[in-house]
């Protein structure tokens, strides 16, 4: 439980809860706070303080990793090798059946011809198995365009360039043994909350030798991703949490910790330690209830006033 949630509980006990939260949740964590600063209207005007209400926000915990957009030349070559080997295996097996039938009808072909056809069929089956195994080595055992539930349109879209294939790699212990429900992909150059692409068309990939971790292939449609491009990837690892967004302008730094100032009552302000591990938009998501207001201008002056010494504005 965050210290911000806890200080809300203390604040509500002292000064009354906002209507939206009256009779709401009780919190048992002890908040990390500074002392309450009491200011007159004149003080507030002199310091140029400005407050802003904390707006509701939602946050989904995610695991982050890196990826690379696959060059589909290898995929096309692998598919061609499998299809060529499969056609040869089918033809040689048909030749065996024909040779056996002719031999059984009275020797229209020799036993040596039957043996030769069977030997060729065995060679072609081995070649097909090798081509299939090589495909698995490169693209994993769960290829969506192979097997009983094969979707041939995926391979067509890939080879035509309508779909990009991204190998996404996450830290080994981040996903346990489960396959992610979806994977989001963004450009490396993207800023906070970038616009990217999300897909649920995922399967396990062989380990990426250049990035230690657990890898998956993900199909991305209608993107501007380029072959060989390195990208950022992310996947949800927990339920969505309701909270608030603390604006970046509200954050101050003191004693190597990050804080903001809540307006706990008219003319009363209190410093609260906050966690900046979840950047979101132009601020940071914090697990807390909306309903309070936070200082977004003059927080550094409040810090200096509270500590009676120089304070750095973060």
Image (cartoon, rainbow, N blue to C red):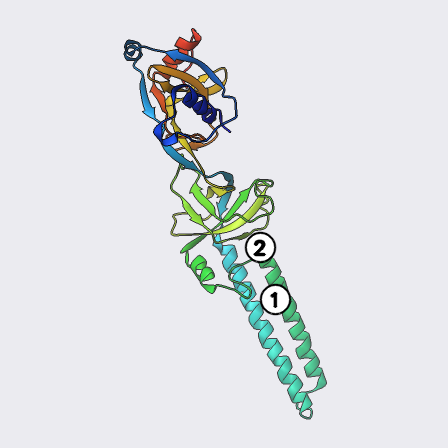
Marker count (numbered): 2
Furthest-front residue in this view = 23
Point 58% across, 74% down: residue: 90
Give above or below for 216 relative to 151.
Answer: above
Alpha carbon of mark 1 to alpha carbon of mark 2: how far?
A: 17 Å
Point 36% across, 28% down: residue: 291
Q: Is residue 254 visible?
A: yes
**Viewer-nearest residue: 262 or 282:** 262
Q: Earlier in the sequence, mark 1 or mark 2?
A: 1
Q: Is residue 191 visible?
A: no
Residue density around tag 2, few if under 14, some if 14–19, many if 20 or more, within 10 Å: some
Give above or below for 134 relative to 65.
Answer: below
Image quadrant in which you'd find residue 91: bottom right
Report whether 107 appears left or right of 55: right
Q: Which mark is residue 258?
A: none
Report whether 304 appears left or right of 43: right
Q: Which residue is mark 1?
A: 128
Residue 105: image location, x then y, percent: 67, 92
Give above or below for 147 relative to 263.
Answer: below
> Between tags 1 and 2, which lies in front?
2
Secondary structure, mark 1, is helix
Point 41% across, 56% down: residue: 161
Secondary structure, mark 2, is loop
Residue 158: image location, x then y, percent: 45, 57
Report whether 248 appears left or right of 228: left
Q: Which residue is mark 2?
A: 140
Q: Quadrant of the C terminus?
A: top left
**Viewer-nearest residue: 40 or 159:** 40
Residue density around tag 1, few if under 14, some if 14–19, many if 20 or more, within 10 Å: many
**Viewer-nearest residue: 139 or 277:** 277
Give above or below for 216 relative to 60.
Answer: below
């Amino acid at each position: 439980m965050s210290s911000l949630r806890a200080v809300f509980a203390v604040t509500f006990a002292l000064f009354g809860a906002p209507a939206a939260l009256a009779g709401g949740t009780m919190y048992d964590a002890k908040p990390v706070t500074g002392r309450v600063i009491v200011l007159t209207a004149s003080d507030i005007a002199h310091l140029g303080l400005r407050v802003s209400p904390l707006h509701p926000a939602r946050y989904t915990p995610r695991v982050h990793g890196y990826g690379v957009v696959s060059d589909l030349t290898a995929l096309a070559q692998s598919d061609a090798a499998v299809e060529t080997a499969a056609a040869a295996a089918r033809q040689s097996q048909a030749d065996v059946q024909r040779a056996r039938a002719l031999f059984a009808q009275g020797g229209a072909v020799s036993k040596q011809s039957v043996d030769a056809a069977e030997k060729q069929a065995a060679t072609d089956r081995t070649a097909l198995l090798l081509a299939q195994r090589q495909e698995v080595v490169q693209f994993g055992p769960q290829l969506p365009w192979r097997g009983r539930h094969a979707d041939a349109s995926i391979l067509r879209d890939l080879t035509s360039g309508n779909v990009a294939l991204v190998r996404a790699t996450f830290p080994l212990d981040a996903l346990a043994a489960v396959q992610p429900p979806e994977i989001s992909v963004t450009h490396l150059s993207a800023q906070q909350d970038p616009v990217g692409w999300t897909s649920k068309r995922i399967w396990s990939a062989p380990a990426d030798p250049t990035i230690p971790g657990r890898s998956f292939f993900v199909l991305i449609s209608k993107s501007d991703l380029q072959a060989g491009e390195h990208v950022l990837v992310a996947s949800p690892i927990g339920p969505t949490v309701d909270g608030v967004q603390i604006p970046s302008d509200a954050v101050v730094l003191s004693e190597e910790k990050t804080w903001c100032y809540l307006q706990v009552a008219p003319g009363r302000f209190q410093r609260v330690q906050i966690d900046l591990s979840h950047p979101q938009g132009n601020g940071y998501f914090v697990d807390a209830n909306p309903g309070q207001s936070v200082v977004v201008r003059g927080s550094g002056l409040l810090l200096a006033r509270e500590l009676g010494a120089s304070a750095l504005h973060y």
